[in-house]
Image: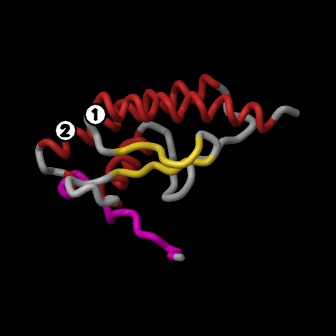
Amino acid sequence: KPVVKHFWKLGNRFYSEFNKMAQEFGLNMKLEGTPLRSVIVCRDEKNNPSLELKSLFCQETVKKGILFGPGAVMYSYSHSMKDITETLTACEKSMKFLKQAIDKKQVSKLLQGNPIKPVLTF
């Protein structure tokens, strides 16, 4: 089966639309890496990676039925373009929430639980 071709098709769409959306919201976040293996990176006002910001974003996507882990965005051969569209819709709503939290300086207050923490360091 054309698994790799399918992953590239899904990944290219998700990667480009996610990054475009983040830029439109004025968020210092993006997918870094390649469309086939990328990582969501959120940066604070000093341009340092922020696990607190990423945690709030991920918290909000989970509420919308989308689970991102702390590592790479992963695709499955069973994922469809419809799944990518639904994921992007959840991301858009979560980015809007994150932008409002940043603007109101309420990120910590709105985070339910502890921020993501690295498990392995190399």
Q: How many residues crowd around disc 1 within 10 Å: few (fewer than 14), some, or many (20 or more)?
A: some
Quarter holding the N terminus is: top right
Q: Amino acid at mark 1?
A: Lys
Q: Is 105 above or below relative to 95?
A: below
For image coordinates 49% across by 47% down, the residue present is 32
- Nearest to the observer: residue 57 or residue 28: 28
The label on residue 100 is: 2
Question: Label 1 to label 2, Cα distance in Å?
Answer: 6 Å
Q: Is 122 above or below relative to 69?
A: below
For image coordinates 56% across by 53% down, the residue present is 72
| 78 horizontally vs 82: left or right | right
Q: Quick check: marks 1 and 2 in contact, CB under 8 Å?
A: yes
Q: Amino acid at mark 2?
A: Gln
Q: Magenta segment, principal secondary structure?
A: loop
Q: Is 44 above or below relative to 97?
A: below
- Find numbered disc 1 in the image and state the secondary structure of the residue it sits on: helix
Q: Position of residue 53 (x, y in %)?
A: 30, 53
| 17 horizontally vs 100: left or right | right
Residue 114 falls inside the magenta stretch = yes
Q: How many residues crowd around disc 2 within 10 Å: few (fewer than 14), some, or many (20 or more)?
A: some
- Nearest to the observer: residue 75 or residue 66: 75
Residue 46 found in image quarter: bottom left
Q: Position of residue 15 (x, y in %)?
A: 52, 35
Q: Which residue is mark 1?
A: 96
Stretch of the chain drawn in magenta: 108-121
For image coordinates 51% across by 46% down, the residue present is 67
- Find numbered disc 2 in the image and state the secondary structure of the residue it sits on: helix
